[in-house]
């Protein structure tokens, strides 16, 4: 494993343990070149999946992009990292077990929306504002009112 600090290719594993949701192995490593310590994660990848973007562009599925988007939507919301990791792992599992080699980006966006809707309404609205390309304050108001109506319907 290449050291992120000095790019040395030799590192030693100091500690290994499963993540909280048991979907990955967390490894603490120490670079044999500079002595820096860093963490890596080892995850199961069931199949290579291509994401079909708008304009028929294709790119490989990248869990890190979903992690980054969800983390940004959940920023300063007090949501435990474990719950965010569970959401992202669940989406990754759905993508990899769908049995398809190509999945439209819109389907992944909807999976993220569904997960955030259940996790936190503010994070859900934040993500939706970018995903659905809100351009005016009215867009937020209309979407927030549908979220509020859905929440009150589920409380009944």
Image (cartoon, grey):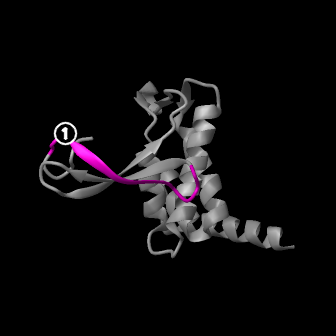
Q: Residues within 10 Å of mark 1 (few under 14, many from 20)?
A: few
Q: Residue furthest right?
A: 156
**Can you say which quadrant of the picture contains the C terminus?**
bottom right
Q: Is residue 45 above or below residue 82?
A: above
**Is residue 21 a member of the stretch shown in magenta?**
yes
Of residue 113 and residue 144, the one placed in the foreground of this image is: 113
Q: Is residue 135 visible?
A: no
Q: Nearer the viewer, residue 126 or 1?
A: 1
Q: How far from the left and from the top, in percent, is residue 108?
A: 56, 42
Residue 84 falls left or right of residue 28: right
Answer left or right for 153 relative to 62: right
Percent position of residue 136, x then y:
48, 64
- How many labels were placed on the picture? 1
Q: Which residues are magenta?
A: 7-22
Q: Report the front residue among 10 and 53.
A: 10
Q: Residue at x 46, y 35 (%)?
A: 61
Q: Is residue 142 above or below residue 46?
A: below
Q: Residue at x 63, y 55 (%)?
A: 115
Of the pair 17 and 144, the residue shown nearer to us: 17
State the quadrant of the N terminus: top left
Q: Helix or strand or loop: what does disc 1 sit on? A: loop
Residue 118 in the figure: left or right of residue 4: right
Q: Is residue 30 left or right of residue 62?
A: left
Does the magenta-highlighted stretch encompass residue 106? no
Q: Position of residue 74 (x, y in %)?
A: 49, 66
Residue, disc 1:
9
């Amino acid at each position: 494993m290449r050291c992120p600090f000095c790019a040395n290719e030799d590192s030693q594993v100091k500690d290994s343990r499963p993540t909280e949701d048991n979907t990955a192995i967390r490894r603490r490593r120490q670079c044999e070149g500079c002595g820096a310590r860093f963490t890596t994660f080892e995850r199961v990848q069931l199949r290579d999946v291509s994401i079909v973007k708008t304009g028929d562009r294709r790119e490989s599925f990248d869990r890190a992009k979903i992690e980054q988007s969800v983390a940004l939507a959940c920023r300063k919301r007090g949501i435990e990292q474990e719950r965010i990791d569970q959401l992202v792992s669940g989406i990754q599992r759905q993508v990899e077990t769908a049995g398809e080699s190509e999945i439209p980006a819109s389907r992944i966006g909807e999976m993220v929306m569904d997960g955030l809707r259940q996790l936190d309404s503010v994070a859900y609205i934040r993500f939706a504002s970018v995903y659905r390309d809100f351009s005016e304050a009215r867009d937020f108001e209309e979407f927030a009112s549908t979220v509020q109506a859905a929440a009150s319907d589920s409380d009944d």
